[in-house]
Image: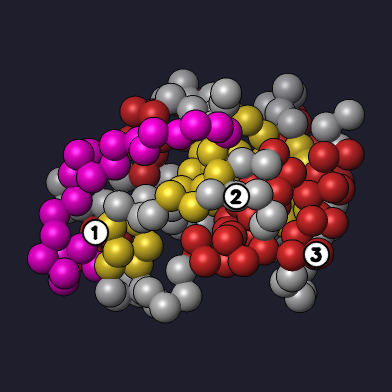
Amino acid sequence: MKSFVVTGIGTEVGKTVVSAVLCEALKADYWKPVQAGDLHALDSDFVRNHTSETTIFPANVLLNEPMSPHEAARLDGIELTEEYFDLPEFTKTTIIEGAGGLMVPLNDVGLCYIDLFQLWDMPVYVVTKHYLGSINHTLLTLNALLMREIPIAGLIVNGARNEASERIYRSHFSDLTITYIPELTEFSAESIREAAQLWIEQQA
């Protein structure tokens, strides 16, 4: 049984959609340890509503303000430490979704998501999206994982293939697995299932 972490090169690149696609493709369970912001529309609810065989592990921490976890936690009177992020008892492959990118802070004394990923020692899927500046953000993310010796499961592009960007990624990471999912404009169980099938076909 192997579980995976999903991180992004930044916010709004499609981590939750990709997490749902991976859950559907791998028949995996799902856990997002921290949710900050709209607690009536959790990312776990999106995954639950758009996958067929996914068990949702509840978040360890629910924060009220839609902002960086370190500040949202402070406002809620919580100091996040590593003890908040003990792994649940997974019984099968599980997708663990981070928030934002690797260096999103969890407290004021240096704890970031990348520290948790290193502690958990699980392969990480990096979600990217093509926009001006995304090459820089993608390479910074991949290099940060490499420097920490955190295994990279692959790069998942949310959107159409961009060969110019792909050439650069491969020039730095020759063994990098790059896959794509379509950038969805409408979300349904069917569209997630179709994206999952496309992703599975790329594994051949």
Q: The magenta stretch spans which residues? A: 72-93
Under tag 1, what secondary structure? helix
Under tag 3, what secondary structure? helix
Q: Tag on residue 70?
A: 1
The residue under the point 10% across, 65% down is 77
**Residue 152 image offset from top left, x and y in percent:** 59, 29
Mark 3 vs 1: CB contact within 8 A: no
Q: Amino acid at mark 2?
A: Thr
Magenta-highlighted stretch: main secondary structure? loop
Q: Earlier in the sequence, mark 3 or mark 1?
A: 1
Q: Nearer the viewer, mark 1 or mark 2?
A: 2
**Residue 26 image offset from top left, x and y in percent:** 69, 39
Q: Is residue 19 visible?
A: yes
Q: Label 1 crowding class (10 Å Cα cut-off): few <14, some 14-19, many 20+?
A: many
Q: Nearer the viewer, mark 3 or mark 2?
A: 2
Q: Which residue in the structure is indicated by mark 3?
A: 191
Q: Is residue 194 left or right of residue 131?
A: right
The residue under the point 28% across, 67% down is 63
Q: Which residue in the structure is indicated by mark 2?
A: 54
Answer whether residue 168 is magenta in the image: no
Q: CA distance from mark 3 to mark 2?
A: 16 Å
Q: CA distance from mark 1 to mark 2?
A: 29 Å
- Residue situated in front as seen by the camera: 142 or 12: 12
